[in-house]
Structures are given as structure tokens and as C-alpha cells.
Amino acid sequence: MPADRFMPTDESADLIELVREISAKELAPKVVEAERTETFPRDVFRTLGRAGLLSLPYPEEYGGGGQPYEVYLQVLEEIGSVWASVGVGASVHALSCFGLFTVGTDEQKNNWLPGMLSGEQLGAYCLSEAHAGSDPAAMRTKAVRDGDFYVINGAKAWTTHGGQADFYKVMARTSDDGARGISCFLVPADTEGLESDPPEGKMGLTGSHTTTMRFDNVRISADRLLGKEGQGLKIALAGLDAGRLGIAAVATGLAQGALDAAVAYAKERQTFGKAIIDHQGLGFLLADMAAAVESARATYLAAARLKDAGRPYSRLASIAKLIATDNAMKVTTDAVQVVGGYGYTGDFPVERVMREAKVMQIFEGTNQIQRLVISRDLAR
């Protein structure tokens, strides 16, 4: 059964119904084959974009949907409950627009943001490097000023939409001053010298291409610097707070989908003369799964409402990411247990979503990093 939502407005309730309709008609029929063949669903992103679903948290004046995060995240959850790769991709696209929106000049925003939010373009985010995953201040990719240009050299690992995106939000070092020596750039995909490695072979989310992006004397105009030199890591970390909420929402959707599949199976499967959901052992397991999904949803919505109110939400964003992704791993594992031997085969979706849940605990900051963020905040 779909999540029972209490939306803040009639408009947002209608939006959720639209998302459910698109997910059922356009996403659900394609997900199994695309994930099996590791096919990037570019047509699906265009469908979402033309429906206005890739630009929801940004203002209408730039082509966005003007929706609060409380609504936007529930849209991501609905998409994630059907196709996690697409839900993650929608979140990454929003994150790739974040730097321009928050620190870009009026001229930069007027020039580029409408196109980025048009639904026809797809963005990517280049922060991590092979040797500097959880420690972005150790990055080595460099951007050197050359008159009215910057020249970027280096490599960025784990880039979602790598080789598929139309633009890349890139963090690169402009000085040797540690964390204060990193700057943020907006790089068009067709810039000479920018190349993508083949997609990584992953355990799950195989419809989402994750690659290393290589910068070989990539020359961009100096007006593609976002903010000032040295502000890049601050921009990146601020964006990650919002991005962690996106992953929390998608993970909650993934868990909701697994719960729905497990409940449907438990109602139909008969043992000892009754449906297995009526056996207390299975019924209680499903009850715990439902409690985990609902608690994850409540936590990310609480963080979203703080963000919408303009209040600090960084700690609660980390808590939401931690709880939602850990719960998704447990719920999807338990869903396989409910379905039994068949759940371990590719014939049932719970096998796939269990594999997909694992990476939720890793990207947008591992859950160990989330615990570090939370504990440091408590120590202040």
C-alpha cells in the first residue's frame, strides 16, 4: 500500500498523485530491464524534467517548482519507492544546481539556472577523489588561473551521471591552503579535455552510471567560478546537508517499496492453513519493518521543516540520513527473509532493493561520518 501522506496544501497533494501516476506508468515498467542491463534511463529523466519534477525546490522565477523541501523530499521518496536509481539521480541533479543558486551572481543565475532547471538538462557533482572520499580537503584536482580562464587538471571519482550529464559542479584546488584552498566551478559537459571513464561495476543501482571524470587541461571561462576562490568546500558541505536529506528520502522510499512487496507476499503465501502474515513471528517482523519506515519518514520531514523555516538543520539532516539508510538496509534484508528462498532470486524485487540499500549507507557521507557530524555538534 502507498505511504499515507499528510501534505501541506491541496496543490502538493495533487503533485504527489501526479508523481505516483508517472512512477506507475513510466518508471515501473522499465526498472527491471534497465537495472539488469545497466542501461542509463535518460528518457526517464527527460519525462520527469518535462513534468517539472527535477526542479521542484528552486524558485519559479528561474524555472523551478517553488516547492518547500517538505514536499520535494516526499516526491523523491515516491520515485525512490519504484526506482531508486532515478530517485538518487533526481537528488543529485538538485544538488548540482545548489552552488549556482546559493552563491552565484544574479548574472550567473539568469544565464545558466533556467537551462539547468528546464528539465532537458541533467547535472552531476564532482567532489570525491579516489584517495579523498570522506576527507575532501585532501583533494588534488587543481584549477589554475590563466588570464580570463581557469585550467583544471585532475580526476574526480564516484561521479553520479558521469558521462551522461550536461554540466558538472566541480570542486578543485586553487591554492595549497588546505580546506580554504578549494573553489567551486560550473563546467559544461562538452568542454574540451573533460572525459569519462567507463561506469563502475556496482553491486546495485546499476541503472545509475557512476564514473571517474578526468580533467586534462580543461579550460573554462573565469566567470564559471561560483562564489569566491577558497569558498568551494564551504559550498560543498552546505550542499551536502540538503543532499543528505535527498538520500534519506530515497532510502525511505526504497524501504517502503520493500515493505509493500513483503506485505503483499505475506498476504498471499499460505502455510499451515493460513496466510503467513497471520503467523505472529512474521506479523511482528513486518510490524518492525513498518515502524522503521515510518520513523525514517518522520525524521527526514522534521529536518525538512527546519530547513523550510530557515533554521539550522545540519545535525538533523545527518540524523535523518543515518536513520533512514540504516533502516533501509534492515527493512530490505528483512523483506528478503519474509519472501524466503524466492527472495534470494532475481524473480522478486526484494533481492535487487536489498543490494541497492547498501550504498545508501555510504554515499553523501558514510554513516560513520554522519555519527562524527552529530557527535561534534553535541560537543559544541
Image (spheres, grey):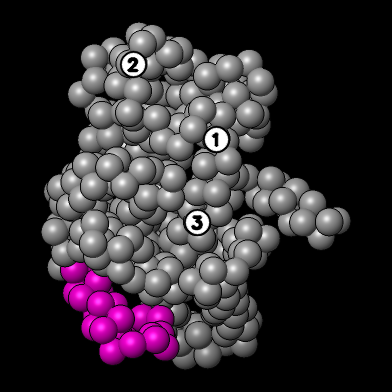
Looking at this view, is 344 or 145 the one in front?
Answer: 145
Mark earlier in primary sequence (1, 3): 1
Looking at this view, is 186 or 6 the one in front?
Answer: 186
Range of magenta residues? 1-24
Circle 1 residues within 10 Å: few <14, some 14–19, many ≥20: some
Picture coordinates of residue 26, whole percent (x, y): 16, 62
What residue is at 49 percent from the left and 15 percent from the top?
142
Question: Disc 1 vs disc 3: Cβ atoms closer than 8 Å?
Answer: no
What residue is at 29 percent from the left and 78 percent from the top?
16
Q: Is residue 78 above or below residue 201?
A: below
Q: Judge left or right: residue 313 versus residue 10.
A: right
- Can you identify the residue that label 1 sits on? 231
Mark earlier in primary sequence (1, 2): 2
Whole-angstrom CA distance, mark 1 to mark 2, is 18 Å
Looking at this view, is 78 or 233 the one in front?
Answer: 233
| Element type where label 1 sits in the image | loop
Amino acid carrying mark 2 in the image: Phe
What residue is at 62 percent from the left and 45 percent from the top?
366
- Can you identify the residue that label 2 sits on? 149
Picture coordinates of residue 152, whole percent (x, y): 40, 15
Quarter of the image where the C terminus is located: bottom right
| Element type where label 3 sits in the image | helix
- Can you identify the residue that label 3 sits on? 242
Magenta stretch mostly in which secondary structure? helix
Q: Is residue 185 above or below residue 64?
A: above
Amino acid carrying mark 3 in the image: Ala
Mark earlier in primary sequence (2, 3): 2
